[in-house]
Amino acid sequence: MEKPRLSFWQIWNMSFGFLGIQFGFALQNSNASAILQNFGADIHQLSWYWLVAPCTGMIVQPLIGHFSDHTWTRLGRRKPYFLVGTILCCIALVLLPNSAAFVAGKAALMIGAGFLMIMDASINVAMEPFRALVADNLPDKQRTLGFSIQTFLIGVGAVVGSWLPYVLANWYDVSSSAPEGQVADNVIFSFYIGAGVFFTAIMVTILFAKEYPPAEYERYHGKPQKGKNFLADIFTDFSRMPKTMRQLGLVQFFSWFALFGMWVFTTPAIAHHIYHLPIEDDSSDTFREASTWVGVIFGVYNLVSAIYAIFLPMIARALGRKLTHALSLTCGGIGLVSIFFAKSPEMLIFSMIGVGIAWASILAMPYAILAGSIPAGKMGVYMGIFNFFITIPQIINGIFGGPIVHTIYNDNAIYAIVMSGIFMFCAAVSVLYVHEEGDITAIRTKPIS
C-alpha cells in the first residue's frame, strides 16, 4: 500500500534534527585533528586517533538500526534513539576541548581521544535512525526530495559549525591563542554553542515530527519479522543484502576513503603546503590560524552542499540518480586534487566548491538509490548495515593512512589529499555500474522553496 505524500513542512520537521547533528559533526571534523595535535599527537598518528569514529559507527549503527526496527514507545520508534544519542554527544562536545583541564601532557591526548570516541558513538546513535525515519514515512516518489532536504539542513548546520570558531575570533574578539597543550577559547566556546544547537534541533524533530504507530506502520510496511537472536538476525540480513546495496558498497568505499583522508589531513596539509610551516609545527599561532581557515573552507563546501541539495531532485529527475551522483563525485575529485595547485589560502575556496557538490550527493543519492531495494520492515537494520560501507574504508584509511603519509609521503600530508581526489574519481566510475530498482523517470519531485 502506497504511503501518503507529506507536506514540505512535515518533511522539514522530520529532518530538522540533522541540522544539529551536522553542527556537532562539523565542529568535530574541522577541529579534532588540531585539538589532538595541541594535546601532543604526531601527524602520522592522527588517522589512528580518528579510528575511534568509524569503529564505533560500525558496531553501533547496525545495532541501533535493528533495535529501532523493533521498538515502539510512547515517544515513538526512532525518537528514543535521537534523544539518548543527543544527550551523550552534547556532554562530549562540552568535555572534548577541555580535556587538558583534567590531566596534562600526553594523558590529555588519551582523554581527548576518549571523548572523541564518545562523541562519534553518540552521533551514530542519533543519526542512524534519521535515515530510516525518512524511508519509513515517505513514498518512493518523495524520497529524493526527503534526502535532499536532509542534505540541505546538514549543509546549513555544517556551515555554521565550521565557521563558528573563525566568527568568534574575528567578529567578537574571542581569543584564538592558547598556551601549548591547551585549546583556544574560540574553539572551546564554539563547542559549547554546538551542544546547545544540537539539543535544540533534535527537540524540534522529537516534538513535531510524526511516526506511524505500529498498526499503521504494518499497513504500509507489513508486520516486522522477529527472530530469536538479534545478532543472528543482523548477520542473516547482511548475507541477504540486496544486489543494489552490494554494488553501492564499492561506491561508498571509494567515497568515504576519500572523505576520511580529507578530514584527517587537511589541517596539516594546508598548514605545511599553503602556509609553509615546518612539519613539526603544530602549536604556533600561525598553525592555529591555518586550522581556523580549514574551518572556513570546510564551511564553504558545506554551504555549497546546502545550495546544491536544493537542485538535486530536479537534476536527478533529468539525468537519473546514478549519473547525477557520478558527475557530482567527479566534481569532488577535481576539487580535492586542485588543492595541490593552490597558491594561497583564498584559492582553496574554489577547491571546496567541487567538494561541496560531491558531499551533497554523497549524503543523498546513495540512500535514494538504495531505499527502493530494501525489504519492508528492514529499513533500520539495512541502513545500519549500509554503514559498514562507510566505516570500513575509514578504518582502512585510518590504519594505513598515517604510515603512508609518514613513510611514503615523508610526512607531507598534501599527497594524502591528492590520493583522496583519485579515490573520488574511482567512486564516480563505479556508481555507473550500480543496478537501481524502479524507474527514476517516474519520480516527480519539486524543488525546496
Image: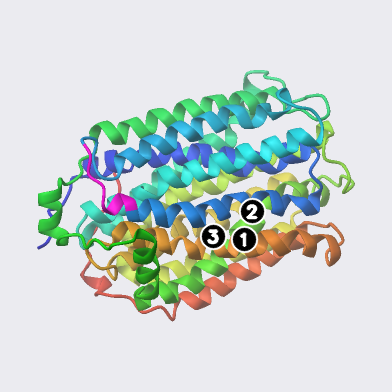
Residue stretch in magenta: 67-73
Can you tell which quarter of the image residue 372 is in? bottom left
Left or right of 6 on screen, residue 200:
right
Left or right of 401 on screen, residue 156:
left
Q: Which labelled disc corresponds to residue 51?
A: 2
Residue drawn at (62%, 69%), measured in percent from left and top? 423
Left or right of 171 on screen, residue 109:
right
Is residue 70 part of the magenta span, yes or no? yes
Residue drawn at (78%, 56%), measured in percent from left and top? 413
Against 87, is 249 above or below?
below
Disc 2 is placed on an element classified as loop
* Between 191 and 271, the one nearer to me in the picture: 191
Circle 3 sits on which residue?
391
Q: Earlier in the sequence, mark 1 or mark 2?
A: 2
Marks 3/2: CA–CA distance: 9 Å
Say whether marks 3 and 2 touch (CB < 8 Å). no
Disc 1 is placed on an element classified as helix
Say whether marks 1 and 2 touch (CB < 8 Å). yes
Marks 1/2: CA–CA distance: 6 Å
- Residue 317 pos. (x, y %): 30, 66
Residue 425 visible to the viewer? yes
Circle 1 sits on which residue?
395
Disc 3 is placed on an element classified as helix
Label 1: few (<14), some (14–19) or many (≥20) C-alpha neighbours in 10 Å: many
Residue at the extreme front of the image, as rendered: 228
Is residue 288 part of the magenta span, yes or no? no
Q: Amino acid at mark 2?
A: Leu
Say whether marks 3 and 1 touch (CB < 8 Å). yes
Against 447, is 434 above or below?
below
Q: Amino acid at mark 1?
A: Ile
